[in-house]
Amino acid sequence: MSRIFSGVQPSGDLHLGNYLGALKNWVRLQNDYECLYCVVDLHAVTVWQDPTELASSTREVAAGLIAAGLDPKSNIIFNQSQVSQHAELAWLFNCVARLGWLNRMTQFKEKAGKNSENASVGLYAYPNLMAADILLYKATHVPVGEDQKQHLELARDIAQKFNNDYAVDLFPLPEPLILGAATRVMSLKDGASKMSKSDPSENSRINMIDNADTIARKIRKAKTDPDSLPDTVAGLEGRPEAANLLNIFAALADAPIEDVVAAHAGKQFSEFKQTLSDLAVEVLAPVGVEMARLMEDAGYLDSVLADGADRARAIAQPNLEEVFKVMGFLNPRG
Ligand code: TYM
């Protein structure tokens, strides 16, 4: 059976990268798979989170998932800390994964920066928790943006080593689903760095909660180069800002990048930005309005997350018990 698991951190505002790299694809997949979508609050605290804001950030992500089009009845939507089995399996995976594997994780190096001695142990072990998230449900497919690919490979390595070490066929090897024209949305201020929640510049990203005026202003201010738009996709080589804006357009329009480039060949950025801005507002502004509406109703969001957690636990607990049994832990109750 095919099962999808994916997650998003409640560590700041959801942005266009999250939307195009993940959420938009999740909405499309919901009809064909059994899906679990998790607000990964245990991941968020690998870096400092203000305790007075974590709950509202968690609700905001839940609102974003629902506003983007995920049906909370047919999908399981929950926050990770409510399902303690994630942390339990993560501990076991700390004992399966090798230090050498984690030492190769590029995202740790990026996030820890120069002062890695001062990074939390959680930030280092984070990919093991991510593997636990996925394998706890024996998920077969994981829709993510490009930046999560290496973590997915580690989850496969953990699954394979566990199966080998204990001579079982317990975990499937989860497949990444990296879909759409914008699998790596770049900053609007710098085509060489990823659009991210942690960028201090608000103008580097479009947030899902932004209103129409803000979306239009950020696109108007986006960095470009002095040339007009190229005639072919090959002409985007060495022009990261142009490539980023055209990929964003293609992803928002659900159109192949070749067609988008052909339709705007030779145009000035000012003209293209106006068309892009109209499209972005048309797609994103209603999502932002719905998100804001849902965020007024904390009771509803909490009930979705509580119901999702109950349903997630019902899958997670028997799977965890199976792992305990395979590993030989004593359970006097049988
Ligand atoms: P997070 O919270 O950083 O991002 C959530 C999803 O958005 C995608 N994404 C992007 N896609 C394209 N361009 C971008 N600029 C961009 N920024 C973010 C991410 O690839 C991701 O799909 N470790 C994960 C959360 C996680 C998870 C999991 C995912 C925890 N456990 C299990 C899948 C399965 C993360 O930090 O995502």
Image (spheres, grey):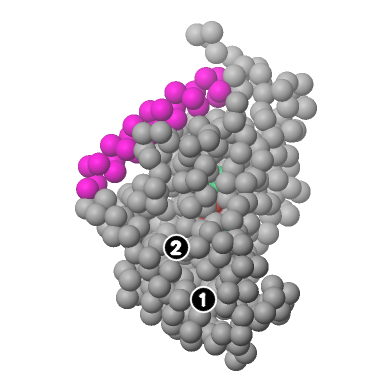
Total labels drawn = 2
Q: Residues within 10 Å of mark 2 (few under 14, many from 20)?
A: many
Identified by mark 1, the residue type is: Leu
Viewer-proximal residue among 4 and 131: 4
Q: Earlier in the sequence, mark 2 or mark 1?
A: 2
Residue 287: mark in rendering = none
Q: Is residue 125 magenta?
A: no
Side of 87 relative to 265 (left or right): left
Viewer-proximal residue among 228 and 142: 228
Q: Residue at x 70, y 39 (%)?
A: 156
- Percent from the top left, x then y, of residue 223? 53, 83
- Percent from the top left, x then y, of residue 36? 48, 37
Q: Residue furthest bottom?
A: 226
Q: Is residue 319 magenta?
A: yes
- Percent from the top left, x then y, of residue 24? 48, 52
Asked whether mark 1 and ligand 1 are closer than 8 Å, the reply comes as no
Instruction: Mark 2 and mark 1 in contact? Answer it, CB < 8 Å.
Output: no
Q: Residue beneath label 1, please?
A: 188
Query: Over which residues does the magenta segment extend?
Result: 297-321
Q: Residue at x 69, y 73 (%)?
A: 233
Q: Residues within 10 Å of mark 1 (few under 14, many from 20)?
A: many
State whether residue 321 is above or below residue 71.
above
Q: Residue beneath label 2, please?
A: 15
The N terminus is located in which quarter? top right
State whether residue 189 is above or below residue 67.
below
Identified by mark 2, the residue type is: His
Q: Label 2, secondary structure: give it.
A: loop
The C terminus is located in which quarter? top right
State whether residue 40 is above or below residue 172.
below
Q: Residue at x 40, y 62 (%)?
A: 283
- Percent from the top left, x then y, of residue 169? 71, 23
Q: Residue at x 52, y 42 (%)?
A: 29
